[in-house]
Image (cartoon, rainbow, N blue to C red):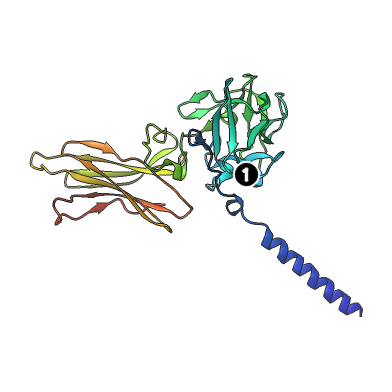
Amino acid sequence: MRRLRHTLALAAAVLTALTVAIVIPTAAQAAPPFDPANGNWSRWTFHSGGNYDLVIDASRSGGDGAAVQLYGDHLGSNQVWFQEAASGGGQYLHPGYDRWLCLGRTGNGWGDRVEVQNCNGTVSQLWNLPRYSQQQYFIKPFDDSNVCLDVPSSNFSQGVDLQLWGCNYSNAQAWATARCYAGSCDREWPDIQDCDTAGAREVGDVSEVGKRVVLLYSAGCQAYWAKMSYSSGGTVTSSVDLILRRYGSDGTVELRFGVRPGESRWSSLLGKRQAGDSFEACSDKPLVPSEPIFCTGVHS
């Protein structure tokens, strides 16, 4: 009988462990769908100035009282913040999964907690976002410009809860962002959305017969765009197409932009819809089918 009880207890422990393993999803899986908020609201994702791979995250996509922390960027709705202008000044910042929640604080003191709160229209949920440098911003309480949203002790580690602290112009209080994010960047222009400076870098570059095509990626926007320079060489008269493609499980999206001889131009943006999407930029000469398309190669 003792052996039977031991066996049953062991089986129950294994079953409990399996149940726990099943019900705890990863951070990326945990994020709910985006709330279809007012189309006039900008979407912001705030990357830490001390570690660009970490962003401001509503812990576990929680409700009232949930912690606001640093977490690895995974495209989740709990890492995108809708910016709503308040009628009396300042901004509300709503987590992407629920427009009825707000980024709030327990006070304006050094070390006071920053958290998700039910929106109530009080000043404790109003913020100012003054520019720090280029695409880096401070996040300050609307009613106190002397304190800033801060990474405690400059500990740029995943899971660190954020706080308010006296503004000191350090990386712990610098938040890099752009004005669109991932799929919301589709067909927007990189310079207008600040994607050309929010962590932008060249990821592909190819040249052929007087044409150069470059594929660019913005970490701040989670989006790609392309640019082409086309030298006529004194003999070429027909235009070419600059192509930007996104490959994903939902199919291929292609944008085309005509480029004339002697011209340089950018494409608009295509953002990531989901993890695993890949992108490439190409040159095509549709009026000369015999001339092959050349591309930068696929990047994700």
Please state if 212 lies on the left or on the right of 254 as rendered: left
Q: Amino acid at mark 1?
A: Gln
Residue 72 in view of the camera: no
Q: Is residue 110 left or right of residue 200?
A: right
Q: Position of residue 118 (x, y in %)?
A: 68, 36
Query: Is residue 177 visible to the viewer in this orientation of the structure?
Result: yes
> Quadrant of residue 161 in the image?
top right
Q: Judging from the image, what secondary structure is the residue with disc 1 in?
A: loop
> Which quarter of the figure is the N terminus placed in?
bottom right
Of 262 and 256, nearer the camera is 256
When the figure is inspected, residue 127 is found, relative to residue 273, above or below; the finding is: above
Residue that protrudes farthest toward the right in the picture: 1
Write the residue at 16% across / 43% down.
239
- Which residue in the protein does label 1 denote? 158
- Where is residue 179 drawn, in percent x and y? 46, 34
Q: Position of residue 272 (x, y in %)?
A: 44, 48
Q: Position of residue 204 (x, y in %)?
A: 33, 47
Tally of numbered discs: 1
Task: Decide: is 29 above or below 121.
Answer: below
Residue 105 as seen in the image, left or right of residue 27: right
Foreground residue, 198 or 34?
A: 34
For label 1, count other residues whose C-alpha is less than 10 Å away and answer few (under 14), some (14-19) or many (20+): some
